[in-house]
Structure formats: structure tokens, C-alpha cells
Image (cartoon, rainbow, N blue to C red):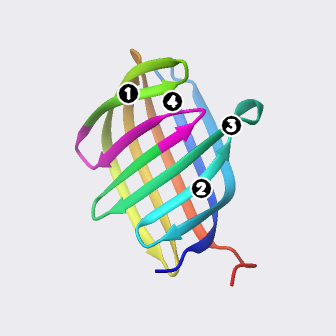
Amino acid sequence: MDDRKMRVSQVSRITGEDGETLVHKIEGEGCLRGDLLTFTETAEQGAKVFHRISLGEGELTVRRTGAVVSTVRFAAGERDSSVYRIPPYAFDMAVETERLELKRTGEGVSLRLVFRAEIGGSRQRTELCLTAEPREDAP
């Protein structure tokens, strides 16, 4: 199975308990190999976060390493608990998935994910949209 070079775009709308909404955008390059999408985010002050998303039937698992470390499984109507690390700190995290829409788009993929999270006692609701499309310059 060949790796396909992808252009990745992700927009997250994160609403905190106070009702304020933060919009977080990621644009970059990645790779799609079967049901595995990988890409790198350049976070604050140039720190790197490596994303590894395993796409399953009705579920997905997001693993992040680097400046942020976490593994979360998303499946509609289900709750997952793990630890969210921003070294040297670690916070308990619980995530409840409200909606997961995953679509193959030709040679790419798009997903919409809505979930509630509690990280270190702070609650938020996130609406995340991600698209990964073949790079025009890729063979």
C-alpha cells in the first residue's frame, strides 16, 4: 500500500464553560496510508506536535506526540478516559463523543467530530472539521 502525500486542513471550535469560543486552525502536509493519516502541527513557539489518526468503522483514534502527548478514542455516544500531557505536566482527561462523521473523498478523507472534554477539571465542547486531500504536486 502506497503512502499518499496529503494537504491537511483542520479547524477546531472550542467553547469553554464561560461560553467563550476559541478557533484553532492547522494547515500542513501529511500522509495517508490505508486507514492511517499522519501530519505534523507547528504549535506555539515552533514546538512540533505529531498527529497519528487511525480511521476505523464508526470510530477513530488520535495519537499525538511531541509538545503534546495524548491518545484518545472517539466513537459516537461513547466516553473515553486518558491522560493529556504537556511535558512536564499531566492532566486527567475524559472525552464524550457526540458526533463522528467520517467520509472517504476520492483519494482523501474528511471528518467532522463533535465532543465534550474535561481536562484537568476544565470542561469544553469542541467541533472539529478535518480534510485531507491529495497534494497537487504529489505523483
Residue at coordinates 23% horizontally, 42% vertically from top-left?
78
| Marks 2/4: CA–CA distance | 25 Å
Q: Which mark is residue 15?
A: 4
Q: Earlier in the sequence, mark 4 or mark 1?
A: 4
Q: Nearer the viewer, mark 4 or mark 3?
A: 3
Marks 2 & 3, CB-CB < 8 Å contact: no
Label 1 element class: strand
List x then y, in percent, for residue 60: 35, 54
Amino acid beneath label 3: Ala
Which image quadrant: the C terminus?
bottom right
The residue closer to the viewer here, 23 or 26, is 26
Q: Is residue 70 left or right of residue 130?
A: left
Q: Nearer the viewer, mark 4 or mark 1?
A: 1
Amino acid beneath label 4: Thr
Q: Provide the residue designation for mark 3.
A: 43
Q: Residue furthest bottom?
A: 139
List x then y, in percent, for residue 113: 42, 50
Marks 2 & 4, CB-CB < 8 Å contact: no
Magenta span: 64-79
Report if residue 35 lies within the magenta region. no
Amino acid beneath label 1: Val
Label 2 element class: strand
Residue at coordinates 33% horizontally, 31% vertically from top-left?
82
Q: Earlier in the sequence, mark 4 or mark 3?
A: 4
Residue at coordinates 34% horizontally, 50% vertically from top-left?
99
Q: Quadrant of residue 130?
A: bottom right
